[in-house]
């Protein structure tokens, strides 16, 4: 598919680029997308939750009443989970939520995500640009020129650009990543993808392996 190349003022440069059908025009695999997004979100979890069980609660181990003859249930310790302040039964323990997915499935998921965005016409190709110094106002002007100031956007750079990244860092709705940092979650979480020309070849090269 052909897409117009815009400059950072939002104007048509008169050039077009050909997006690879093998990356931007496949039949999306929803299950691959689901697994990749699930893995991404699972990896964000710290897994540091912890509740004290019976053996870890502070308290006396003295038997609080005699075994028989009280007319109530037997009880051996104030740390019994049935009592207020007692331990938790099968409480959460620190653990890792991460799990593995093979590379081919992850590539399929990213290609599916790109294809979904392309089908929705939510991909913009922008010529490479840079700022002399980090300046949030300049980045906001780029968003306004593209009509994205009130939308969640993901800018994909070919290589790391400190000035562009720092210019966008204070904006909650915009995110700047390099082509090597792309994830299925980031692609789908944005309303619009802004692909810089320098990133296209790298994206297609990485996903066509």
Image (tube, rainbow, N blue to C red):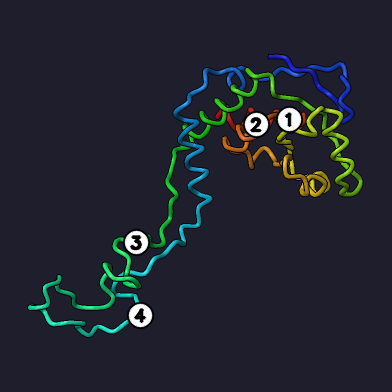
**Residue tagged 1:** 195
* Alpha-carbon span between mark 1 and mark 2: 10 Å
Please identify the residue farthest to the right as the structure is shown: 132
* Alpha-carbon span between mark 2 and mark 4: 56 Å
Expressed as whole percent of the image width and height from the top left, the position of residue 180 reads 64, 40
As drawn, 136 above or below 69: above
Q: Earlier in the sequence, mark 3 or mark 4?
A: 4
Callout 3 secondary element: loop
- Marks 1 & 4, CB-CB < 8 Å contact: no
**Residue tagged 4:** 58
Q: Earlier in the sequence, mark 1 or mark 4?
A: 4
Q: Earlier in the sequence, mark 1 or mark 2?
A: 1
**Residue tagged 2:** 203
Callout 1 secondary element: strand
Tell us which disc is closer to us: 3 or 1.
3
* Alpha-carbon span between mark 1 and mark 4: 57 Å
Callout 4 secondary element: loop
- Residue 91's label in the rendered image is 3
Tell us which disc is closer to us: 1 or 4.
4
Q: Residue at x 53, y 50 (%)?
A: 44
Expressed as whole percent of the image width and height from the top left, the position of residue 63 reads 19, 83
Q: Earlier in the sequence, mark 3 or mark 1?
A: 3
Q: Earlier in the sequence, mark 3 or mark 2?
A: 3
Front residue of this view, candidates 20 and 12: 12
Q: Residues within 10 Å of mark 2 (few under 14, many from 20)?
A: many
- Residue 40's label in the rendered image is none
Q: Earlier in the sequence, mark 2 or mark 4?
A: 4
Name the quarter where the N terminus is drawn.
top right
Tell us which disc is closer to us: 3 or 2.
3
Please identify the residue farthest to the left as the structure is shown: 69
Q: Residues within 10 Å of mark 1 (few under 14, many from 20)?
A: many
- Marks 1 & 2, CB-CB < 8 Å contact: yes
């Amino acid at each position: 598919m052909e897409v117009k190349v815009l400059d950072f003022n939002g104007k048509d440069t008169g050039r077009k680029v050909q997006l690879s059908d093998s990356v931007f025009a496949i039949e999306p695999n929803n299950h691959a997308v689901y697994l990749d997004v699930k893995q991404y979100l699972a990896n964000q979890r710290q897994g540091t939750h912890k509740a004290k069980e019976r053996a870890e609660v502070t308290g006396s181990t003295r038997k609080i009443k005699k075994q028989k003859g009280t007319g109530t249930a037997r009880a051996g310790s104030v740390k019994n989970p049935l009592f207020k302040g007692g331990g938790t039964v099968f409480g959460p323990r620190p653990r890792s939520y991460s799990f593995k997915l093979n590379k081919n499935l992850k590539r399929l998921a990213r290609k599916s995500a790109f294809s979904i965005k392309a089908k929705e016409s939510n991909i913009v190709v922008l010529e490479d640009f840079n700022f002399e110094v980090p300046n949030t106002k300049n980045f906001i002007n780029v968003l306004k020129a593209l009509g994205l100031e009130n939308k969640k956007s993901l800018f994909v750079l070919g290589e790391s650009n400190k000035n562009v990244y720092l210019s966008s860092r204070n904006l909650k709705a915009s995110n700047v990543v390099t082509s090597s940092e792309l994830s299925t979650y980031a692609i789908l979480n944005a309303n619009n993808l802004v692909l810089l020309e320098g990133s296209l070849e790298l994206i297609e090269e990485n996903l066509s392996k």
